[in-house]
Amino acid sequence: MVDPSIRGQCSDKALSRFADIISRCIQHEPEFRPPMSEVVQDLTRMVSNVSRASM
């Protein structure tokens, strides 16, 4: 489920990666959630990739 206002602003692949990160962050068992440092790295990498793709 994606907000229609952001459709077309980034690839479906990027949206899928973002959904994967969200899914890992909301795991019921804390030991299955990633450390925030990993989340920050993943999001930073995603933003960088999306920025390069839009140039």
Image (cartoon, rainbow, N blue to C red):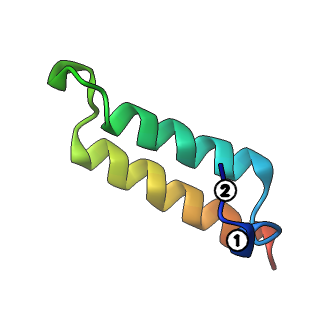
For residue 49, side relative to residue 7 (left or right)? left
Q: Quadrant of the C terminus?
A: bottom right
Three-letter code, disc 1: Ile
Q: Nearer the viewer, residue 43 or 18?
A: 18
Q: What residue appears at the point 25 percent right and 48 percent down from the top-left corner?
A: 37
Q: Are marks 2 and 1 in contact (CB under 8 Å)?
A: yes
Q: Position of residue 40 (x, y in %)?
A: 34, 55
Residue at 45% x, 48% y: name it. 42
- Mark 1 is surrounded, within 10 Å at the Cα level, by few (under 14), some (14 to 19) or many (20 or more) other residues, namely few
**Which element type, helix, strand or loop, lies under badge 1?**
helix
Q: Nearer the viewer, residue 38 or 31?
A: 31
Q: Which residue is mark 1?
A: 6
User: Which image quadrant is residue 23 in?
Assistant: top left
Disc tally is 2
Disc 2/disc 1 C-alpha distance (Å): 7 Å
User: Could you tell me which secondary element the residue under label 2 belongs to?
Assistant: loop
The x and y percentages for residue 6 are 70, 71
Residue hosting label 2 = 2
In the rendering, at what x and y percent does residue 3 appear? 65, 64
